[in-house]
Every structure is written in structure tokens, then in C-alpha cells.
Image: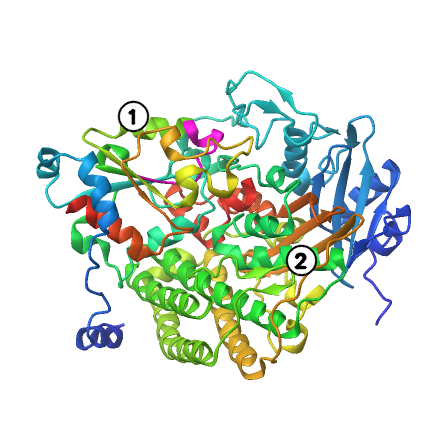
Amino acid sequence: MRKLLFEILVKPPLTESAPAPDDSALAQLARALDQASRKRLGRSLAIRQVDAGSCNGCELEIHALNNAYYDLERFGIRFVASPRHADVLMVTGPVTHNMREALERTYAATPAPKWVVAVGGCARDGGCFAGSYAVTGGVADVVPVDLHIPGCPPRPVEILKGLLALLA
Amino acid sequence: MSETRTPTPVIDAPSLGELLQSGRSAAEHRPWPRTVVDADTWTLAAECLTQGSITLLGLWGEADAVHLALVDEQDSTIGVLSLPCPDGQFPSVAEVHAPAIRLERTIQDLFGLKAIGLPDARPWLDHGRWQNRHPLGNAERISVGAPRYPFLPVEGEHLHRIPVGPVHAGIIEPGHFRFTASGETIVRLEARLGYVHKGIEGLMAGADLALGAELAGRVSGDSTVAYAFAFARAAESALQVEAPYRAQWLRALMAELERLANHFGDIGAICNDAAFSLLHAHCGVLREQVLRTADTCFGHRLMRDVIVPGGVTQDLDPDSAAAIRTLVAEARRRFPQLVDLYDNTASLQDRTVGTGILKPQLARRFGAGGFIGRASGRAFDARRAPGYPPYDRLDFQVPGLDAGDVDARVWIRIHEVEQSLSLVEQILARLPSGPVREDIATAHASHEGIGLVEGFRGDILVWLRVGAGGRIERCHLRDPSWFQWPLLEAAIEGNIVADFPLCNKSFNCSYSGHDL
């Protein structure tokens, strides 16, 4: 283990420089967020992730944000275990009927001010699951959505761009 | 081939081949036979499952029939028995063979067919939140209202219950776990799943093959390649076409890259759940490198929608092949150090060795696939037997262990990483040239096909009936997790609550793949 740790010390870090915030996401947010609440949040975000029916593809890429290449925590963004600690709910999936109440209750448990970021194509309109007897058809049908990050799944760098737009 | 078989006790069980001959053979079912049987043969098959002479591969319904996919592991015979249900009921297989319980509860929920004798009559995927009861059978509109779900009773002094989920503390899929503990020790775990049921089999009905492949690739995101692979093989079997030779090899290349990415991720995540985050960080780097290489080569990090019936949508250019060679060389250099670290960290071994033991007889009885089965003495690997191209031309080993604990499941993954690296090298060295996609002619009659493909967590079964005009009439997708989730409940018994995340991660069952 010591050898491995030593190697890490002498090698340059893998972490890459931050991408520019997504312009369209910025524009979307400018309408939704006012200056005062941004000031209140400062430069940190606590995120509670909720899988409301995804295929788990989005979860894999959200997970990747924590790896050494993206190193999400350097931006003051971190995932938290409880909605009570969260500023942001990050929701994936077409919202199945079986998950609807759990999502509503998680939203209710998140203290205001709060934002909802919907991640992935299904979270917008149900994606290829739209029209099924078992799905609602998009996160916005259940809780108000402030930002949508498209993709199936979006690449981690795209999720990161969206989150940085929240902080900008 | 040897004709000898180990003698089975109690009754002289018929072989799967004999069972498949005791009924009317269904035409246009490939590559393995399907036989329409009567209730007596159906019940006899259930007895054979109980005795262990054959293994359950799948059990699914239609509006007026049920189907039972079986494998004889001694000679790799595979076949499907079908029982018509004109009066809306069938004899329960689960009455004598527990692995079928949740499958039959699902058939009752989705199709409204009644399993006579089913020991657990509670609904499974239906949480009372859909507008239709029996949505895939004779759907009846009902008023939505979630009834209380009765968990199994646990009796005894000083027991307490811990309800967990469906929304968990980490970035994971939703499911509910009901622990009953005596102090720190778990005396019973009962899972309740179905939260991410999307109705995929309902969406399949009436879809064309292109949409079907898209849906199949979204059953479980971590296995998108394996699902698309299995779906394509089922469709190609049904329509009697073969993907071009080069496409078959590219499919295997993607399947092995997917296995590598998932195993790297899992090994790190298991160590992370034992609070050893250093390995998590390093394995996370390896995983990310695989995904980035996949993105470079196939235009998608998870290689989604690349495998389609008839071939693949992306060819591999020489630069991409070179990128994969670099990836493999890097992994070969870095991974042994990480394995060494895992093997020589006493505090980590203290958590994984002897934790969450799954007994070999249970793994065999449930037909558990993947690293879960192979860590508990069941060597089944669909790449080896029944096998499919190009694996019949590749050299690889199927690792096996008997300990059945978290440590064994880590080691199976480690050995499979080594095998997959070798497979990727072999595929790149011998990749045939030629086209990668062929048009699939539209069928003029009904055809049926099965695909059985080894995903990273076990064998994925896809059963497909394509009607005239190329529309899907019925498609069933069986995730390996169906036969693994119940075993987690057995493996966790007697362990402490704090070891549940570790055990759960070492199983890494799919919620979405199971819930469909």
C-alpha cells in the first residue's frame, strides 16, 4: 500500500479542469432562480439523489461524478444521505406509479429553498417508457423541475456542467 | 458424449429431453424446442426441479398460457414447456420449488392467471398503484389505492424491525428492505421490490424490432450490452438469420468491456462499503478508463443501442482497436497491484471473509448465475454452455469457488477481470473482417426465438415471439437477479445489520432488471 501511496504522490493528478457551465442550462436557470436565494446557498450544494424508476444507467454516470476524473466535491457539491440535508433533489427515471409517492414524500422532506434537477431522457417525458400503464411520464408531472439535463444517460461531464450552472 | 448420469433419488426422474417429447412440439421455435404439455407433465417438470435433475431458467405468462424454460446442466439441454390455461389457472411450480414463487406472483399480477397451490399469494410487482389490474391479461380498470403489504411475521422476544427504503441513503436503485434484528444480528430480511416496474413487457407488445432492441437495452442500464445482445440473438433465432461474423465478434468485445467496467466498479464499491475507500478510488479510475474507451470506440460510454437485430450499428476502426489495446495494457499493469492490496489488507479481509455466506446447495437449487453462483460452487456460464459465437472459438476459463462469502464473490470478479482482459486481447487479435450489419427480412408468419447471454451478473434470458409484419407479439426478459435476490435474504441471516451494505453490494442484484 505504501508503494501505491508513494506513486500517487509523485504522479500528476487525474482530475481534469472544470468545464464551462452549460449556456442553455444557465439561461434556463436565470429565469428560475433569483439572486437572493443564490446568495443564501453560497458556493455549495447538497444533493439527494432519487431514482424514481430509471434503468440505473443514469445512476452509473451520477456515481462517476465522484471518481478522480470529475471529483465533484472540489466544487463544494456533494451527495447527502437524507433529503433533510439537501438543497437539490436529483431525480432520474420516468417516475413509475410505484415510486410516485416516495418521490413526493422525499420532496416534501426537503427543506426550502430547494431545487429539482431531472437527469436523463426518461425524467423529461418518460422516454421510451412513456405511455406505459406503470409510469407517470416525467418528473415535472410529480414535482416542479428547475433544471433538466438530457441524455440517455448524460455523460458525467454534462451532469457536471448542469450542476455548475446551479452554482454560477 | 457420455450417456451416464448421476442417479437421482425418490423417483426415476425423466430427462429434460423426455419431458420435451411428452407433448405437442411448437413449430417455429428456435434454437431450442418448445413443447405444449398437459398439466400432468407440467407437474412432473416441477417435481424434477425439486429433485434438482433440471434447473429453472424462466417462468412467464401470456394471456392464456404459461411457459417454463428449463436447462439440464449435465448435457446443456434447454427447452421450454408451455401449458395452456383456458380456465385462467395452472398448477403452481412454486408449491414444490421455491425459486418460482416470485415469478408466479408476477404472473398473477400481470396476467391474472391463478397459480393453484402457490404458497405465497401476496401481490409482488403490483403495489395497487396502477389503474388496471392484470395489465397484460384481461385488464380491469380499478380505483387506485395502495393496500397495506403484509410482511412475513417474525415471532420471538426482543426482536426489533428496521424498515429501509425504497429511497436509500446512497445513489442506488429503490427497493424496500424489512430487517428483523435481535440486537445487532439479523434474524430475517425480507425484500419488497417492484418500485421501478415500468411495464417494459407491455411496451414490447406491438413494437417493431428496432424499438424492441431499444427497450431491451434499457431493462438494466449496467447490462445494456448484454440485454441488447440477448434480444438480438432471440430475434435472429426466431427469424433464422445470422449476424455477420465480424458483428458477432464485436458484440463479444462490447460484452467483455461491459463486464470489465462493472467488475471494476463492483470490486471498488464492495471495498468502499467496508470503509476502504482507497481501492474504491483506484477501481473507479479503471472503470472510468473503460467507459471512456468505449465512448471513443462506439460513441457511447455504456455502448447503448450499438447491438441491434442483424448486427451492430458501429464498426471498430484501427485507431479504436489501438485505444482498447492501450486500455488493456494499462489495466494489466494497474490491476494486480490493487488485487495485492485487497489480499494483504487485514482490516478489509476481516470484513469480507466469512461474511454473507451463500451455501452451495441453495445456489444450485435457485440456479443462481454469475459471480453469486460461481462463488458458491455453481459453474454455469452461458458463454461456455450452451455457448454462442464467438465464445466457442475463444479460450477462457470459468472461475469457481465454494466459500460463498463476500470474499469469494470479490475473488470471482477478480478472476473474471483477468479472463475478460484476455478475451478482449484474443478478440482484437483475431477480429474477422467483413460487414457488420445485415437487413432482417420481415416475417410473414409467427416465429419464436430464445436468446441466452451471459451478462456481468449472470445469464439473461430473452424469449420473443415475432408476428407477421415484424411486430413483437410477446417478449419476456428474465434478469439473473430473479434467482439472486431471494438468496441475499438467506445469505444475510445471522450477520450483523452493519454488514448488509457489504453483502448487498457483493450480490449487486439489479432492481430495474428484476422489476422490469
Rendered location of residue B146, percent (x, y): 50, 20
Mark 1, residue position? A108
Left or right for B221, reference B476:
left
Q: Give, as a three-letter code, the residue at label 1.
A: Ala
Kind of element beneath mark 1: helix
Q: Nearer the viewer, residue A81 or A56?
A: A56
The residue indicated by pointer 2 is B452
**Contact, mark 1 vs mark 2 (Cβ under 8 Å):** no
Query: Mark 2 packing: few (<14 Cα in 10 Å), some, or many (20+)?
Result: many
Q: Residue furthest bottom?
A: B429
Q: Name the subunit of mark 1.
A: A
Q: Tell if the residue under mark 1 belongs to the same chain as the one under mark 2.
A: no
Q: Under tag 2, what secondary structure?
A: strand
Nearest the camera: B179 or A69? A69
Q: Position of residue B68 (x, y in %)?
A: 75, 45
- In the rendered structure, the answer to whether residue B292 lies left or right of residue B384 reads left
Other-residue count near label 1 (Cα within 10 Å), few / some / many at <14 / 14–19 / ≥20 = few
Residue B335 seen from this side = yes
Q: Please provide percent x and percent y for residue A22.
A: 24, 51
Residue depicted at 69% across the width and 55% down the height: B235
The residue at the point 64 percent across, 66 percent down is B383
Residue depicted at x 53% and y 35%: B194
- Note whether residue B72 is visible: no
Q: Identify whether B142 is placed above or below B251.
A: above
The amino acid sitting under disc 2 is Leu
For the record, the magenta segment spans A90-100
Q: Mark 2 — on which chain does it sit?
A: B
